[in-house]
Every structure is written in C-alpha cells, then in structure tokens.
Amino acid sequence: MRDKVVIIGGGVTGLAAAGFLAETHDCVLLEREAEVGGYCRTFYQDGFTWDYSGHFFHFRNKWVADYVHERLDVENLLSVKKISRIFFRGRYVDFPFQHNIHQLPIDDFLRCLSEMYEAQADKSDKKYSSFKEMLYGRYGKSLSDLFLIPYNEKLYAIDADELDADAMGRFFPHVEFGELLQSLARNAGYQSYNDEFAYHRRGAQAYVEALASYVPDGVIRTETPCERIDLERQVVHAGGQEFPYDHLIATSPLPRTLRMAGLEDEAKVFSANKVLVFNLGFDKPSTRPEHWTYYPEQDWVFFRLGRYDNIFGEKRMSLYVEIGLPADAPVDSEAYLKRTLEDLHRAGVVDDHQLISHVSVVLDPAYVHISGAANEAAEKMFKHLAGHGVHPLGRYGQWVYCSIEDNILQAHELAKSWGGAENIKAG
C-alpha cells in the first residue's frame, strides 16, 4: 500500500509538492479557496492584468526554470531587465541604496561613506542582537537612518530592533566598504540576483496553472478548509470530512497550523504584518521607466509600487501599490485609496491621469517577523510536529523569508526523501 500524503494549501509550495508526490503516493491537496494559487492568483479586469501583489520570477536554478516553463506557452513569456529605484527626498536613487550612496548630495554621501568605513574598520566577528543593531554595526548611523531602517520598519510595520539580525538572509544586498570603493572607481553598477526577471503576459496565474498541470486529476480539492489536525490519530478534519495521513505537508502559515493542531500557546510567539495592495489602472501611460520603486519616507502611505505597463509595454499605466500595516490594524480601503491617490499625485506618479479601474486585496500574513524567539520556537515545533508526521513547508509554513524558487526546491527535496519525484531530476 502507498503512503497517504495530505497537503494543506494550494499555493506554489503545495502544488509543487503534489506534482512531485502524486505518482508515488496516495495524495490529496486541500485548498480552502475556490481556486488554487494562494497569493499568486491574478485579477483580469477592464483589460488590465494584476496579481494579488507583485510576483516577478527570478529563477537562479535552471532546472526549476525548465520545470515550470515546460508547461507554459513560452511565446507569451517575457524576459525583462529590471529597473528599480528609490524615491528619496524628491529625487530618484538607484536601488539598492547602500550601493548607490554616491547619487546622494555630496554632504550625505561623504557622511555615509565615512561612517560606513568606521563601522567596518573593526574586523572582529561581531554578533548582533537585532536587525537594527546589525545595520548600525555594518553601515553606520547616517546610511541606516536615511534608508535602511525607515524603509524596513515601514515594510515590516515593526521596530527593526524586534527583527533578527539575519531576518532577510541572502536577500539583503550587503556591501563591504572596499567593494563599494572598487565599484565606484570602475563606475560599475550593482549586479543583483534579480537583474533580469521573467514574467508571463497572463501574470502569476500562468505559473500556478503550469505547476497545477503536473498534478493528476482528483488530487486537488478546493473549497475544503482545514479545521483541525488530530496529531495522535494522524487525521486532518477538513470540509466535514476526515483525511488520515502518513505524512502531512502543511503550507498554511505556521501559527495557523499550530492552532489547528491544538498548540495555541506555542503559536503566540509568531507574528507578521499584513499588506494592503491596490491594483490601479489609469487612462494614460506611465511617465517613468521603473518596474518598481521604493518609498522609505513617512510622507508616503505606501512603501513600494510597481508598474505592470512597463513590463507589458502597454499604453495605460497599471500599478500595484503596497501599504504595510500591523496585523491588528483596521483596514479602511476607501480611506487608504483616497490617501494613495493623493500621494501618487504629490510624488509625480500621477499627473492628469484618470483612474478607470481598481481592485484591492489584503495579504495577511504578508512579511513574517523573523526573530530569535520565533526561530527557537519554530525549531522546537518542527521537531514536535515531525514526531506526528507533520512537515511544515514553504515561506509561511516554515516562517522564513524565501523565494518562490526556494519553495519549489524544498518541495522537491522533501518528495525525494520519501521516494517521490522519481521521474523528475533536478539539475
């Protein structure tokens, strides 16, 4: 008899896991919504294509790219060389800020450069207790206070002192003082992991459909919300039914998984912000070339906006605008839309453009708060859950900061460890 695998959640991670395991295991995927995709779903409205939020695909691993693209109509796949900037004190500075401080006024540049040199002159192996302490310790006060701290506090909707020093892992674009000087001397721009990104003309939904196409019929059950996990009996209660399992893959947010498993107290240590996303369509094209722009200052209600029209080459401005909020903050969408449109006009993004279509969505949770206490609790909980056949997986399942590509690779590694993915070889 084949092992029974239950997968909670039909986002990218759950779909990838189902595709890797369904041929070798008795698999069922439970999704509470009417359609799969999680946060990678797409709106099609009034001729505009908008994702729930900006999901652009940066594949570093050729095997993952080939695996996904195998099921895409590649003639509609775009490869885009990224343009990203920061709107700071009424001017545009190339992203990332710490690599481009030479674009600041000379006084700010010299102060940032001097303090960064002093901060990094101490070559001892420092241990930082928080994200804020790490920023001051590596980059000095001026650079940190100008952008690194205000932007990240606006993004996470939390004090940077409450985040782990390595909260963003490999996604934080660190720079050493010597490297920065060499880059300036050579007039060489910063090369990031996502200088080029892929995007489909049908949005993120096309990637979801590609992953779902690997899953055999009958495996995915939509509109089947999970209510409870009986750890002792190894049974999931969902949609009025019982689903016994040998292995349970939980891609649901870790605190939700813990609560479903009756571990209420253990769930309390994990926190995250939520993000209100406005997708906005206007009657005229963008006046700027960026694909996305960062807004660190409190003058602006949003922390980032992206321009779909600059990706698609369209003649009507199509934006996603993101507002970071504490998890318990009330969301008055009409009030936030009014403030967003006012700020877009003040920032020069909107001139005499007319808003002709819009839709909003709240991502909750959005950016997880990675802290020392959360890391310690997560490690303890993973061991406890594994003893009952439960394996949290993915960005929210494991409460980490990672990419879509990482999620697919995690699912593949787990499937291989169970004897799945036999005909799917990763390069």
Image: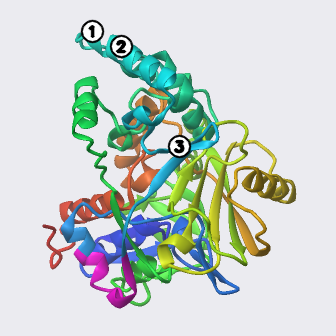
Residue 1 visible from this viewpoint:
no
Which one is in front in this view, the residue at disc 2 or the one at disc 3? 2
Q: Amino acid at mark 2?
A: Ala
Q: Position of residue 427 (x, y in %)?
A: 13, 67
- Contact, CB < 8 Å: mark 1 with mark 2? yes
Q: Amino acid at mark 3?
A: Val
- Contact, CB < 8 Å: mark 2 with mark 3? no
Q: Position of residue 18 (x, y in %)?
A: 36, 74
Range of magenta residues: 66-78
Q: Residues within 10 Å of mark 3 (few under 14, many from 20)?
A: many
Label located before the other in sequence (2 or 3)? 2
Residue at the location (48% across, 30% down)? 371
Q: Residues within 10 Å of mark 2 (few under 14, many from 20)?
A: some
Residue at the location (65% across, 49% down)? 274
Q: Which residue is mark 1?
A: 122
Question: Where 374 falls versus 67 (above or below)?
Answer: above
Q: Which residue is mark 2?
A: 119
Task: Looking at the picture, tell me which residue is in the foreground, 47 or 239.
Answer: 47
Looking at the rendering, in which quadrant would you find the N terminus?
bottom left
Q: Position of residue 25 (x, y in %)?
A: 28, 76
Task: Looking at the picture, tell me which residue is in the foreground, 91 or 68.
Answer: 91
Q: CA distance from mark 1 to mark 2?
A: 7 Å
